[in-house]
Amino acid sequence: TRVLLTGGSGFIAAHVLNVLLGRGHSVVTTVRSQAKADAIRRTHPKISNDRLSFFIVEDIAQPNAFDLAVVTDPPFEAVIHTASPYHFHAKDAQELLAPAIIGTTGILKSVQKYAPLVKRVVVTSSFAAINDVFASSADKVYSEADWSPITEEQANDSPANAYRASKTFAERAAWEFVEREKPSFTLSVINPPLVLGPINHNLTSLNTLNTSNQRIRDLVSGAAKVRCPPTGNYLFVDVRDLGLAHVLAIEKEAAGGKRFFTVSSHFSNAEITEIISEEFPKYKNRLPTGDALKPGEYSADGVYGFDNTRAREILGIQFRPLRESIVDAVKSLMPLGVDR
Ligand code: NDP
């Protein structure tokens, strides 16, 4: 299948791209600069230009940003939209809301107008669009049936809420678009919780490491020894399984019109720390102990559950366990000097 992948320079998109190419698809990926295109090109030296090429979209928050990107010869049959800012240092909620919402509605509009052969659009949403962070929820079992109740007002309360709102409003806007416009493609949405696992996207510095792997970087480097980073949620998925989920969502007819809550298991800082200490004993002295592990511990009342039945049964994903994800993430950070 001929696929358009947005945000090819990202941590997750790099794995989506690997799976797409590995399963024989032909891909055009959007990036913000030629330098980013060149870096991705270098990681796939054996893949021909017919099967991997690039289109520059500098800012997805611009209306019509994707109008030219969706037109290609031979035409696209599927689109995977991963691009969206993910960080916790926005000075203003709009910094995240605009690219998330306009980016998502923008690609759907461009596909509807200019790419009539597209049958499936897959959008990367988040557990942030499912989770009610304001509820005390020890008894709750989250699934695709749940929606975050976050409001526009709450989006302005903190950078973390701005991010949660950006994912929630963008996903809502996508479903509303499909409902209203009845386009000729079907929509699938992937809702991952914290994504961990090996990086393979040409990073040259740990300073630009994607947000979700910063926890592992800070544990191995010793930066978290005095205090662990807090945990916004207690569920994780491995990036390789998530990459596969995105591709299966374009391959499987039955995935149309559905959200997929792609979860492997719970995680806490204490569990990650224990795995690093057992698998990489030389880092033991850098790891937090005792009170330093408190931020990000499971609440005393217990922690919510999850139901990943749909992702296992319809997509057929078998989720990797936390240990494999952590071990491979740590190994992938070593060439960048995480242990120096
Ligand atoms: P990255 O930061 O690695 O990737 C984000 C991607 O979006 C990059 O390619 C980035 O481009 C691109 N991007 C951001 N803003 C713009 C913009 N204004 N114009 C054009 N491109 C833009 O993060 P992830 O790979 O982790 O995130 C990918 C997706 O997964 C996001 O939608 C995120 O919300 C979602 N997600 C991630 C989770 C996680 O734990 N990692 C959990 C749940 C959902 P550039 O590299 O040039 O900055």
Image: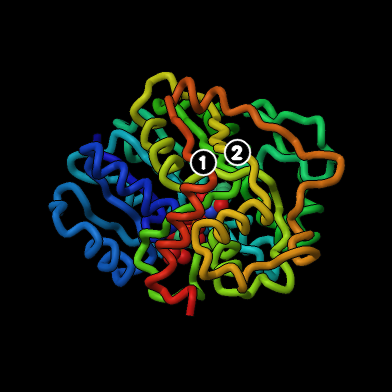
Q: Is mark 1 within 8 Å of ligand 1?
A: no
Residue found 82% across the figure and 37% down from its top: 137
Asked where in the image residue 21 lies, by quadrant, the reply is top left
Q: Secondary structure at mark 1?
A: loop
Q: Judge whether 282 appears above or below 24 on screen.
A: below
Q: Mark 1 highlights which residue?
A: 321
Q: Is residue 62 visible?
A: no
Q: Is residue 318 visible?
A: yes
Q: Secondary structure at mark 2?
A: strand
Residue found 29% across the figure and 34% down from its top: 77
272 with respect to 328 (left or right): right
| Picture quarter with the N terminus | top left
Percent across and percent down for residue 59 are: 46, 62
Mark 2–mark 1 distance (CA, rounded to whole Å): 7 Å
Residue found 51% across the figure and 54% down from its top: 326
Q: Amino acid at mark 2?
A: Ser
198 with respect to 72 (left or right): right
Q: Which mark is residue 265?
A: 2
Q: Amino acid at mark 1?
A: Pro
Residue found 81% across the figure and 53% down from its top: 153
Percent across and percent down for residue 128 are: 66, 45
Label 2: few (<14), some (14–19) or many (≥20) C-alpha neighbours in 10 Å = some
Percent across and percent down for residue 279 are: 50, 57
Asked where in the image residue 127 lies, by quadrant, the reply is top right
Q: Judge whether 257 appears above or below 161 on screen.
A: above
